[in-house]
Image: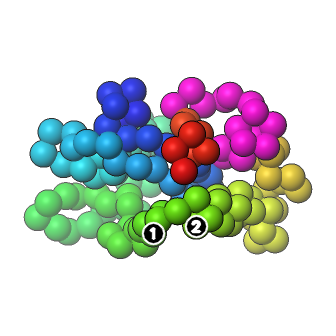
Amino acid sequence: MVKNGKMKVYGFVIMPNHLHIIFKNLEKNGREMPYASFMKFTGHSFLEELRKNDSTLTNKFKVERLSRNHQFWQRNSLPIKMYDREILEQKLNYIYLNPLQKHWNLVTDPNDYYYSSCSFYEKEEIKFTWLSDYRDEF
């Protein structure tokens, strides 16, 4: 979505069972919004990966719906609109602390968590070329 100019990603954290992502939709991807395309693409990718590596896990995501046989994403993903820089920075700080929570205990410094954009802002590390700096726009 980023490469095709449909979305900008300002920050993220991928956790063992969920993710937080701060993005901006730029334009529709065909008939759907970029976040819908993202969810559809990743859902299909998860299913393909599970079928290749551990097909028994696919049963955990099985649903009986007309629109799909498997569901990987929560139906209400709790979106929050970022009206200004202050809200965006508050949410970034919140998500960057996720890997430090006691029940996860993944790292002691948020910059050390690889699956996060924290070090992009704190250390100016460019591990993910698809990230955009929110400070350029807010």
Q: Name the image quarter holding the N terminus.
A: top left
Residue type indicated by callout 1 = Ile
**Could you tell me residue 125's position as x and y percent?**
74, 31
Query: Of the residues shown, which amino acid type is indicated by label 2?
Result: Ile
State which tag comes first along the sequence, 2 or 1: 1
Q: Position of residue 137 (x, y in %)?
A: 52, 44
Q: In this view, does 38 lie to the left or right of 85?
A: left
Query: The magenta stretch spans which residues?
Result: 115-130
Labelled pair 2, 1 in contact (Cβ < 8 Å): yes
Q: Which quadrant of the structure image shows residue 96?
A: bottom right
Q: Element under label 1?
A: loop
Q: Could you say which is closer to the camera, residue 68 or residue 37?
A: 37
As drawn, the label of residue 87 is 2
Residue beneath disc 1: 80
Q: Kindly indicate the quadrant of the structure image that contains residue 58.
A: bottom left
Q: Position of residue 15 (x, y in %)?
A: 62, 56
- Tell me if I can see residue 114 in this picture: no
